[in-house]
Amino acid sequence: MQLELNQLMIPPGSNLLMKNVNWQMFEDLLTELGDKRAARLSYSRGILEIMAPLPEHEDDKVIIGSLVEIILDESNIEFRRLGSTTFKNQRMAQAIEADECFYIEHETMIRGKKRIDLATDPPPDLAIEIDLTSRTHFDNYEKLGVPELWRFDGHQLQIYLLQQGRYMDSATSRHFPQLSVKEEIPRYLARSKDIGRTRTMREFRAWVKEQIG
């Protein structure tokens, strides 16, 4: 008897690891699951991980993504926010779905595209992972060449910059070096849980305007 994917039950906050998954099986799984799903997937050389996020995980990713949008808006920088889009490279046998991701300096190269193929298209310039119950797959991001990766563990924001193919911890963001995002993003995220999203966004926008003059 063959196990069907729709028989699997993954409680929120849990991960499922599957081994010996070939690329075609991974592609078939993506098709079966579809785009409108809560689960996040990562794939690396035959190992597939399926993660079911907690509601808090989703709240944090939305707020942090919105804070990044405000920085980009106030800096008058064109960008494309692609959320948890599946980024994959069959030749490398690597695939990842970030919690949030942004094209910034390479936005013009993927502007208007409905499908992105990392065999020919650049990876996102900034990826964001919320690690409340799961672990960030640094190898996947390194192999796919994502220049900047943020990891939020529920308390601290860590910034990693890709240097010679490996991530190095950084005190500042490559994209927003003039802003203390490592300290301020978690502070405003925590504030949103006390005063609400709308007021927090308004206060953060005012702070960004003050910082960039």
Image (cartoon, rainbow, N blue to C red):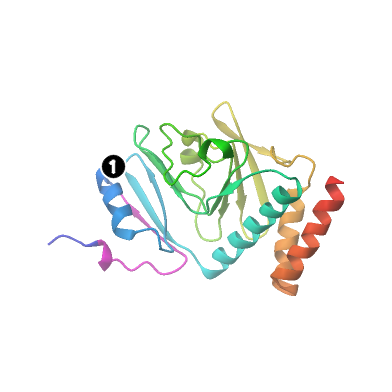
Instruction: Pick out the residue farthest to the left.
Output: 1
Q: Quadrant of the N terminus?
A: bottom left
Q: Residues within 10 Å of mark 1 (few under 14, many from 20)?
A: some
The residue at the point 74 percent across, 49 percent down is: 181
Between 108 and 180, the residue placed more toward the observer is 108
Three-letter residue code for mark 1: Trp
> Is 122 placed left or right of 22 in the picture?
right
Between 113 and 208, the residue placed more toward the observer is 113
Query: Does residue 7 show up magenta in the picture?
Result: yes
The residue at the point 34 percent across, 45 percent down is: 47
Give the answer, above or below, for where 162 lies relative to 50.
Answer: above
Query: Does residue 82 show up magenta in the picture?
Result: no
Where does label 1 land, which residue? 23
The residue at the point 80 percent across, 63 percent down is: 203
User: How many numbered dots are placed on residues in this image?
Assistant: 1
User: Which region of the structure is painted magenta?
Assistant: 5-18
Q: Is residue 113 visible?
A: yes
Instruction: Pick out the residue farthest to the bottom.
Output: 195
The residue at the point 51 percent across, 60 percent down is: 133
Q: Quadrant of residue 50?
A: bottom left
> Is 186 placed left or right of 16 in the picture?
right
Q: Percent from the top left, x then y, of residue 77?
A: 69, 43
Q: Percent from the top left, x then y, of residue 29?
A: 29, 54
